[in-house]
Amino acid sequence: MDIATLRKTHPEHWMKAAALRVLAMDAVQAANSGHPGMPMGMADVATVLFEKHLKFDASAPDWADRDRFVLSAGHGSMLLYGLLHLTGYADMTIEEIRNFRQWGAKTAGHPEYGHAKGIETTTGPLGQGLATAVGMAMAEESLRARFGGKVVDHYTYVIAGDGCLMEGISQEAIGLAGMQKLSKLIVLWDNNDISIDGRISLSDLTDQRARFAASGWKVLHCDGHDPADIDRALTEAKSSDRPVLIDCKTHIGFGSPGKQDTKGAHGSPLGPEEIAKVREIYGWTAPAFEIPPEIKAQWEAIGSRGAAARAEWEARLAGLSAARQAEFGRVTAGEAPKKLTATIRALKKQAAEAQPKVATRKSSEMVLEVVNPAMPETIGGSADLTGSNNTLTADLGIFGPENRKGRYIHYGIREHGMAAAMNGMALHGGVRPYGGTFMCFTDYARGAMRLAALMGAPSVFVMTHDSIGLGEDGPTHQPVEHLAICRATPNTQTFRPADTVETAEAWEIALTTHDRPSVMVLSRQNLPTVRVKHTAKNLTAQGAYVLAEATGKRQAILIATGSEVEIALKAREILEEAGIGTRVVSMPSMELFAAQDAAYRKKVLPAGPVRVAIEAAGRLGWDRWLLGERGREAKAAFIGMEGFGASAPAPVLYEKFGITPEATVAKVRELLG
Amino acid sequence: MDIATLRKTHPEHWMKAAALRVLAMDAVQAANSGHPGMPMGMADVATVLFEKHLKFDASAPDWADRDRFVLSAGHGSMLLYGLLHLTGYADMTIEEIRNFRQWGAKTAGHPEYGHAKGIETTTGPLGQGLATAVGMAMAEESLRARFGGKVVDHYTYVIAGDGCLMEGISQEAIGLAGMQKLSKLIVLWDNNDISIDGRISLSDLTDQRARFAASGWKVLHCDGHDPADIDRALTEAKSSDRPVLIDCKTHIGFGSPGKQDTKGAHGSPLGPEEIAKVREIYGWTAPAFEIPPEIKAQWEAIGSRGAAARAEWEARLAGLSAARQAEFGRVTAGEAPKKLTATIRALKKQAAEAQPKVATRKSSEMVLEVVNPAMPETIGGSADLTGSNNTLTADLGIFGPENRKGRYIHYGIREHGMAAAMNGMALHGGVRPYGGTFMCFTDYARGAMRLAALMGAPSVFVMTHDSIGLGEDGPTHQPVEHLAICRATPNTQTFRPADTVETAEAWEIALTTHDRPSVMVLSRQNLPTVRVKHTAKNLTAQGAYVLAEATGKRQAILIATGSEVEIALKAREILEEAGIGTRVVSMPSMELFAAQDAAYRKKVLPAGPVRVAIEAAGRLGWDRWLLGERGREAKAAFIGMEGFGASAPAPVLYEKFGITPEATVAKVRELLG
């Protein structure tokens, strides 16, 4: 539909949509950077969605049963900010819009989760929003199965662009959603045929409708500038028994005489002259950042449209038993059950006594076997490595179209899609996602793991086969740099536990953390129990601690993580027998140790003794602990990997790469001179 | 086709294929680890491919015009090793097969490029082989356009499994190949309906045929156990005008009475009893690792089948002019043209004189503007950020179905697919790929960037917008941990040049490197020329060097990279004025500096002065240079990022995050006490 027809046939709609368009155009111009074309193109779709379909109440943005709206094409952030401002979200003031892309504003260049209510997830890296939304829709299904359709019954809407659909992660999301028959997931494709480099035909000829249909989606289409057609498609989508793609044919930079349908509308301000022309074409006379009161009132009516439904929902919630209400409140608040600590502590005690010699991936399974029954909100899964990641425990049941009460997801060979879906579940709330793959394939999941950190989503990534210790599969499967990658990522908790006790402690921390993801880095090979003396206290929470003290004069400190703690302990035995007092420090989490106060760090790593760190990984990141923090120095060495691994049985690899007690002893002797 | 029918109707084929199956079964059993099911399932397809279609000569595995064969489902490595051994590749002896997955063997758990001839690329991380093969097919098209179909005319065959097709990277590869109409790319899908967790229907219901067709592929199918049907499909595929998917319906673990068609056949030895039963079903009586001579002879005849074609090809090559032959030899050997150094040197001189104040992404474009005409084998591209990455230079032309002489690829929004395709081009040889995206999106390309390092493929990744210096796009687009990620990755050269001169030097190194990828980390924002005195010598090759010396007593050393070198120089000015002698060290490549001898490192970073490093990124990796290497100590500090970035204009961000000359000066004063 062209503008003239649209203005004539839908004058009220037109002005509401124009408000979104003008805000985007003006904010981008004021910031002198940003993306006006997408909001201008999708304003009609967004207006119809918010006006007629989206279940929300701007005065209660945390309403648990609200529909989720995800702007996967995050560069069009001004569309979202405009919607939130116009519908009356309290924290999205016109001042925030004026300060688009400025320091301290809630209106970042791309939508940032946590900056303002109504931003359901951080988007910008393309495809992430779509894949995250799949997790939100799965969380909704799971919670509905658990708490009933009276308190959980909402849709997840996504606006995705051509870029989202070209990214590989989109295929993982589409495949997963299709198989799971997520009928309450509705994706609105901004089909404007333009990307940054120019027309889509420069780089793609994919028939997206056929592609989605091939993965079991229902496919609809509409004229993205015809409100009635958009409404029809949305109405039809809501009654689907499968996820729905709505192909919305739109014009990027709609109404810009010089830039509509060109890449020029995508990522730069239109310029004052062009904006003046657009205003005239739109029939918009108000100055920048001023919304005529009658238009604002219409939008605010949309914003409060859901208030009655919310009140009814609250009444329905109140109709549940007190225990059910409390449980619903607990899981949506993301609070771990009170008994979790006792459950973990009991397991620790048992492990310290029984001293199992198992791989930490098995230890992790042992923990999950007691945690999952105690914590009904956990949802586990694996990217097709269930038996290797040890992520499936008894009685979880498989989550699927026929069993929404199942708590285990076969994610398929989709590490990136899995990680993003986990983020979506964590953000949705009410469930606690964990999911597994091999540590090496953090590479594939990186985009979503970074977003988890940036958003503070408490996803738990279970990464097994954590070093050359995996053996024969060889260097493609052997992480070397991946611990450094996780440790380098801000706001990420990386755990590499040495035995069942540390694994249990790491899980306790992960499951009680609200504001960051955790990475559980677990061995394939069996390891002895090293924490043979039970402590009620969670020592892993300190990041590092003295596991074995020197006898007599302390001449050396060995620092190790995970599977190398065993090596450190053996080296210590040899050294002690030779009269060289040796302390062993277990460091399951470098980040948590760095977060301790200087006094504790100094207590664990005092100046004086030589230091040798042992980790079957690269050195990057170790020098801080080896060379001493500022003002303290040490003679030090690192025993680990200098390059990639190799294919051979694990014990051979440890021997060949020189990660052994004997090599450690030799290094200590060399340093002692 | 069932085994009984197959044995009866195709007895010779059967025994050849059985040899592959038995070798796989026995080698996995001997190693007590590995994946027998896939080779057993795809042996018929592979036998027909090698016997009737693949153009190769086992005695000349480096024949430039050979067909490429990529085993994307790399866990089925024994299929490839078996093929290479049976057809007579000299370095794939039966001893290597016996030593499958053992230390020092060429027969790693997954195929490792460089271990043995005939392994065209490293596979194992699923989907990589398929995406890499797309690059090989593009390299073939490009070289054919350049040197003519008489010397370049070959196919690229891929065996891909369900896992390859579920990974997101596969969609990027499929989309790219479809758009590029790579008619000489033929993918054989091992459609066995089984993944590690069980039946594919546990996690996917995608109609793969429809999916490939949606991206413009020709789709064929065959009974993967019927030699005639396989042959028919391959014959038809070779005359396609588009890339071809052949859906090969197979049975994993074909013939195993207890494990065929189950996940039990996927990733574990079958066990001696089961193997004995399979031998009987196969009619195979020879002991493990013994191939009956008549069967070996048949296979060796296949291996030498291409000798005549190769001789003819050599004659055709000899028919080219001497200059053309020399040029073909030069580019297929990956040698840079002799004039490259002089070209770069001239640009350096010019930059030192003109002292442009430009972003290093622009500097990179200036380099490419002189390099591309001098080096006709370069093939540039970008993942839809051409104007931002500054990767397109004049007269390159756009590579596409209608212009195979074009040297610039619009990869689309497909960072991972781009990186893998670049690897494929680099491995194919004859072309020098470089490709751009934002530094932050190394996250998306990680899987392929790691493989480049592992394989030693000299791909050049042009990563612009390298820090908070990109400004308003905000934290989703601002790298913080990505320098550490690249530096932590073995066998990767990371460059963060400070100006046009260093950028030119970095490019010279990247383009003359044969054995590792390079990452060019480039600024969005303008930077002054800091190398104002021309040196013929490439100082960047030393990794770090003294850019500005202290006047009088050297009290402080400032170490910086890229855009922060300007800050270091400004801080030095202030400090020098205050009488504090300050050296500035520019460190464009931490890895190359680490590779220098200790004497040089000590010369650049002598003990004594306080040290402050400045980099708008995380600290991980810096302590080695700050705290002093073993035996040398320093009072030191780091000025950089502690968490994620923010959305605001770049100068504001530098100020707010305290990465300024003033903060540097204050830190030096504090350290000096």
Image (spheres, coloured by chain):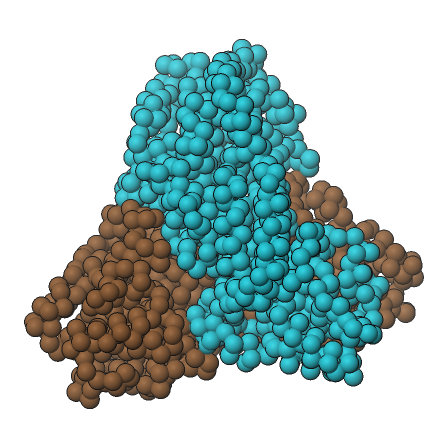
Chain colours: A brown, B cyan
Residue at horizontal 31 percent and vertical 72 percent from the top: A271
The reply to whether residue A321 is in sight is no
Give the quadrant of residue A599. bottom right
Residue at horizontal 46 percent and vertical 82 percent from the top: A104
Where residue A472 appears, x then y in whole percent?
A: 62, 41
Where residue B145 appears, x then y in whole percent?
A: 41, 32
Q: Is residue A263 above or below residue A329?
A: above
Please name whichever residue, A551 or A479, is drawn nearer the observer in this view of the structure: A479
Where residue A113 appears, x then y in whole percent?
A: 41, 74
Give the quadrant of residue A316. bottom left
Please name whichever residue, A204 or A134, is drawn nearer the observer in this view of the structure: A204
Could you tell whether B514 is left or right of B418 in the image? Answer: right
Where residue A107 appears, x then y in whole percent?
A: 39, 78
> Which part of the image, by quadrant, shows the N terminus of chain B?
top left
> Which part of the image, by quadrant, shows the C terminus of chain B?
bottom right
The reply to whether residue A76 is in sight is yes
Q: Is residue B166 above or below residue B53?
A: below
Please name whichever residue, A104 or A493, is drawn nearer the observer in this view of the structure: A104
Could you tell whether A288 is left or right of B283 in the image? Answer: left
Please name whichever residue, A192 or A363, is drawn nearer the observer in this view of the structure: A192
Could you tell whether B605 is left or right of B117 in the image? Answer: right
